[in-house]
Every structure is written in C-alpha cells, then in structure tokens.
Amino acid sequence: MAAMKSGALPKLKLAPNLVPRLAWQTRRLLRQTGPGAVAGIACALLAVLAQWHATQLDQRQAALTQQLNAAARAAAMPHPVAPTAANGVAAFYSYLPAHDLIPDQLKELVRVAQQNGIALNKAEYKPEMDSKAGFLRYRITLPVKSDYASVQGFIIGALQALPTLTLDSVAFKRDQIESGDIEARIQFVLLVRQETRR
C-alpha cells in the first residue's frame, strides 16, 4: 500500500451559495410534497416525542412506586417503645445473667485469659450484696504476670466476651524497667441477678 503524502489530502470545498441553495431545495420539496405530507411528518414527529415523554413518565412512576412501597414497609414496622424509668430498669434486670450462671461466666473468663496467654494461678471472689439493688455484684480480683499487650488483650477480650462484666480497677507494677513482663492486679465486677430463694 503506497503511503499518502500529507499534501495530497483532498480539501473539502463548500459552495459559496450553499445556504441559499439549501433553502431553495427545502421550498421545492415542500411544494412537491404538499401540505398534507408536511402535516403527516409533523404528526409523526409529535408521536415520537409523545412516546419518548410517556417512557420517561413510566420510569418516573416506577421509581416513585418503589419509594412509596419502601415508605409503606417502614411505616408498617413496629416502632420500639421509648424506654421509661420503669421498663428501663426491668430491661436491665432481665439482661443480667442468672445467679446460677456464675460458674459458666468464670469459665469464659478463664478461656479468654488462656486465649491471651495469661495463666490465672490465683483469684479472689467476693459477692457483694446490696439490699436496695435487685442484682449482685461479684467482685473478681486477679493478680496476673505477663507482658503489657497480653494483659491489655485479656482485659478487652473479657469485657467483650462478658457484657455484664465491668472493669473496676487495674494496677501495674514492673520490678525493673528493662523487664518485659509486668505484674497487674485486675479487679472486675460481674453483675448477675440475685439468687432466687426457694
């Protein structure tokens, strides 16, 4: 295939009287076709425009119908009752684990400790009764020795695993600055329902 020279490209030349010629051709075609054909073409164009507009309205109606259905479903869903002092306290008490589940809660605490590489060699458990409260505070004191990251992971893991467990206090002690291990005294409080008396 021979290469074309850039100078050999044909140049498009427009006639100097192009606009008047197009106007003359349009008038000639209108005279030949007659007013009925022009009206027919105009009607066809209006029909195409009306069909396009109807399609747009159908799409808009479908979108609005979806929004209305979503709003109707949302309105039909039951709304949560706003907590009052009475039902808030009742919900709190029903959320607490039963007194009989204390051993299971302690097993879960030991599992979280083992998961974080902490040995629970010693522990103090002390129930604290409050005659005015409808629940029992079960104080758990754990002296542990490990690196800081493991102790921190244990505390966070325990609080996440046991929702009614609270961190009362934690004290850190390190014998030497260069030592990697720390001694920590962790005090948790486990909230449980009071034991039902038979």
Image (tube, helix red, strand yellow):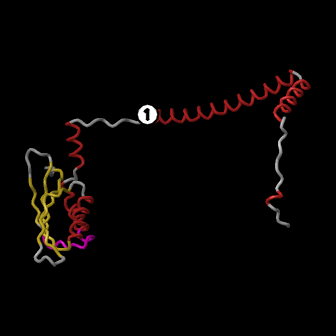
Q: Which residue is mark 1?
A: 76
Percent x, y of residue 159: 23, 59
Percent x, y of residue 79: 36, 35
Q: Is residue 89 above or below residue 6?
A: above
Local crowd size for mark 1, using a 10 Å CA cut-off: few (<14), some (14–19), many (≥20): few
Q: Quadrant of the N terminus?
A: bottom right
In which quarter of the view is residue 34 placed? top right
In which quarter of the view is residue 45 placed? top right
Which is more toward the observer, 90 or 65? 65
Percent x, y of residue 29: 88, 28
Identified at 25% across, 68% down, the residue is 111
Identified at 22% across, 50% down, the residue is 96
Percent x, y of residue 107: 23, 65
Is residue 198 visible to us here? Answer: no
Q: Helix, strand, or loop for circle 1?
A: helix
Q: Residue furthest right?
A: 32
Q: Is residue 197 magenta?
A: no
| Highlighted range, magenta | 113-122
Looking at the picture, which amino acid does disc 1 mark? Ala
Which is more toward the observer, 43 or 190? 43
Which is more toward the observer, 81 or 48? 48
